[in-house]
Image (spheres, rainbow, N blue to C red):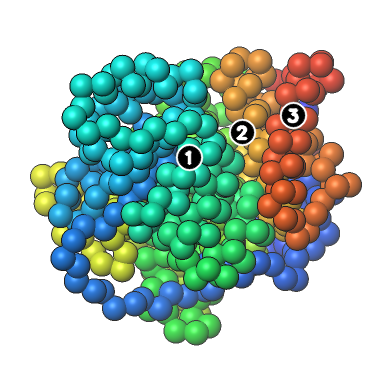
Amino acid sequence: MLGLKSSSVSTQRAVAKQAETAPRRASVLCKAEASAGPPPAWPRRCVVPEVKERSDPKRFSVLGSTGSIGTQTLDIIAEFPDKFKLVALSAGSNVELLATQVRQFQPSLVAIKDASKVALFKELIKDMAVQPEIMVGEEGIVEVARHPDAESVVTGIVGCAGLLPTVAAIKARKEICLANKETLIAGGPFVLPLAAEYGVPILPADSEHSAIFQCMQGLPENGLRRLILTASGGAFRDWPIEKLAEVTVAQATTHPNWSMGRKITIDSATLMNKGLEVIEAHYLFGVGYVDIDVVIHPQSIIHSMIETADSSVIAQLGWPDMRLPIMYTMSWPARNPVTDKTWPRLDFTKTKDLTFRAPDRLKYPALDLAYAAGRAGGTMTCVLSAANEQAVQMFLDEKVSYLDIIRLNEACCAAHTVELVTSPSLEEIVHFDGWARAWVEQHVTSGAFQSKKTIVMA
């Protein structure tokens, strides 16, 4: 069971302050926030370079072209052919959609992860006059990431599978449009020093981190005080805790505001998505965990905020539409002009009320677990991310209950404390990613983990 004590602290910021010295979830993971870490992508500010006019479209590779991020990225490229051009793409197994994309955009290189689908894909495009080069598996995805004609790579692959292609893109000095949060959550201790070494910018495409990135541009040195991440609260934000034991896969994969993939929609429901975003924000912007707050904002109009040194709060607002943060990473530092027809303007008379509340730490134990893993640092965030991916998949396969997801994550992180590596190599990150997945699967399939569908309110 999940044994938690409800907080007596009335405000979200006070909760974060309290958690800095005595985190309530998985306190065994760490005793204090690490004193040093990898260099952040944007250390508490962003100096915006001069916008340079181009006579040709910017060239992109897209990883995960048939997923939610990938299809929206291609929609943007299709709408603005004078601004963006696709040169290479990768997909997993949806070769029917992939074939349609290849016909439309005519990339020179295509990578398919599932080798068993290659023959069907070739059949689907056999009448094309110009055939793309086709590669298979992880090697092919890496080649898409470092394609010589690409200037920038949109990383839309879900999970830690995006880590190695991102590393390859950085080494090839490609600009990174980061839509795969696990790249930093799992690989931050390795990826960030590598990006600094190669002088490669990491541009956040997640709506919350894009909002922070936009808000902090132009800040002076020491101008940033704290980050405020907003969360919709997910599918069960208005459910009583007692009802969570009844959650079905269909209910957990339906989001009230956003159109997203199944895994991230479940993460939104557990609030693990927000916990992982806290870790990502720490790595991206170099802000300590005590100065990263989370607030529930059901309308999803304010995508995140920053507080400046003089207590001013700056927010980025917009309709809940992932295309905007994706396009901003693709066009940065420019602002790409759009039309009202396909990009509706925010109308404050139609937004209803904008409301906020502190997250219920009993209802959302993932949040404190993520803060604790972040403070532990090193391979602990990799283990949390991988364990969560495996646990969510097992929930989707109906092998564990909804409440088991976070219980499995916590147990896996606790088991990892004896092997925690504070400054891991890429090989160690990949190793512990695999270890965490295997640990979760083994503990469920062997019967060592007992499924429970209740929360103890102690």
Q: Which residue does the image show at 84% across and 39% down from the upper left?
A: 415
Evaluate if marks 3 and 2 touch, with contact meaning CB atoms under 8 Å apart.
Answer: no
Quadrant showing the C terminus: top right
Going 73% across and 24% down the picture, which residue do you hit?
Answer: 441
Mark 3 or mark 2: whose residue is earlier in sequence? 2
**Residue at the image point whose x is 77% and y is 30% from the top:** 439
Q: Cα distance, mark 3 to mark 2?
A: 11 Å
Amino acid type of the residue tagged 1 in the rendering: Ile
Residue 50 in the image: state x and y as whole percent.
29, 78
92 vs 275: above or below: above
Secondary element type, mark 2: helix
Residue that numbered label 1 is attached to:
141
Q: Report the mark closest to the observer, 2 or 1.
A: 1
Q: Which residue is mark 3?
A: 438
Does the rendering let one see residue 298?
no
Kindly report the distance in space between the C-alpha atoms of the residues bearing marks 2 and 1. Answer: 20 Å
- Helix, strand or loop at label 3? It is helix
Label disc, if present, on residue 371 of the rendered structure? none
Tell me which amino acid carries mark 2: Glu
Q: Nearer the viewer, mark 3 or mark 1?
A: 1
Residue 449 % position (x, y): 80, 22
The residue at which mark 2 appears reads as 389
Q: Height in image: 312 above or below 176?
A: below
